[in-house]
Image: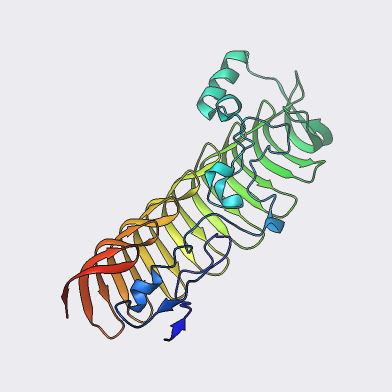
Amino acid sequence: MNTTFFDGLPSELPVNSQRYLECQREGNISPVSALTTASYLYDMGGGFDEDDEDDENGPRKALHNAPFAKRLPMEENFDSDDEDDTNPENNFVSPKKLKSRVTKSTSKSPRKLLKVENQVVHDKYGDGGMYTGQISASDRLPHGFGKMEYDNGRYFAGNWKGGRWHGNGKWVNPNGDSYEGNFVYDAREGKGVYRWKNGNVYSGDFKEDKREGKGTFNFANGNVYTGDFVNGIFEGKGKYKFQDGWYEGEWASGRYHGEGFLCFSDGSSYRGGFVNGVAHGKGEETSANGSVRRGIWENGRPKMEMEAS
């Protein structure tokens, strides 16, 4: 009995390890069916090298646990349960609510602004650094456009409001990761680009400091996902291109889930239902030699063949 590891699988998704199952090429298990039985392929239980991280920590994680100091799921993995949720109901404040609080506590009269250059200035949280730009004359908090080289090694250049990052700006982590785009009271909100030092790049929508909406994730190895994101992970509809093929269809919790089409460079493909990353339900499989079989799949294996050609 011959067994082999299939290296045509979508490689280097942000998983703990690529644990390919040894799959049989004989019997009623064809290469495509066997590939979809690699049950750990889409397990988002692990992630990028922890040595690469300070990574995608919220801009204020190290700044006194501010409202948006929450870890994004892609930082170490796609599991949102790993976010800082010791008491999310009490700790998290949405940009809309935070904005209303700030509005109520702010005087209606316009702020008087001063311009400073290379002076020690502190933000709303008391974190300081060398600052060049506009500040409020009353409290000397950054307000307007300015650049701050923080004492802790972080850097921000962009728009400020009452000592908070608010509007377009660029934030650079000490480890080399960076984000450029829109902020709403310190949280990434709207359009933005996040670059990891390892070469991964995300470009697209953010909501309440997480990837949410439409976006493109370019992996350093050349793989690309373009589509929907929910709570930081692939969810909805999207296309994932990898070295030996591509998948296009529905996703849930970072896995192929729903109707989709999986195609490999040798011409083999599967079109039909997926559940948790494996073929499940009604589907059609085409082998590299062009033969087609249609049937019902269960957990990645053909359960009932409807017709063959």
Q: In the rendered image, which quarter is residue 262 located in?
A: bottom left
On screen, residue 213 versus residue 220, left or right, reads: left
Is 188 rendered above or below residue 288?
above
The residue shown at (47%, 60%) is 42
Please tell me which residue lies in front, 190 or 79. 79
Write the residue at 34% across / 62% down: 299
Judge whether 210 appears above or below 28 on screen: above
The quarter of the picture where the C terminus appears is bottom left
> 126 or 253: which is nearer to us?
253
Is residue 275 shown left or right of residue 169? left
Q: How many labels sit on residues?
A: 0
Apparent side of residue 42 relative to residue 250 in the rendered image (left or right):
right
Apparent side of residue 160 relative to residue 79 in the rendered image (left or right): right
Name the image colouring. rainbow
Q: Position of residue 173 (x, y in %)?
A: 71, 49
Residue 293 position within the rendered picture, expressed as x and y whole percent measured from the top left = 21, 75
Rendered position, 7 above or below 271: below
Quarter of the rendering containing residue 300: bottom left
- The x, y position of residue 199, in whole percent, is 62, 63
Nearer to us in this view, 83 or 180: 83
For the N terminus, the quadrant is: bottom left
Q: Position of residue 242 (x, y in %)?
A: 46, 70
Say which quarter of the image contains residue 14. Answer: bottom right
Residue sitting at 27 percent across and 65 percent down? Answer: 297
Residue farthest front in this picture:
1
Asked if residue 108 can be seen in this view, the reply is no
- Tell me if I can see residue 62 in this picture: yes
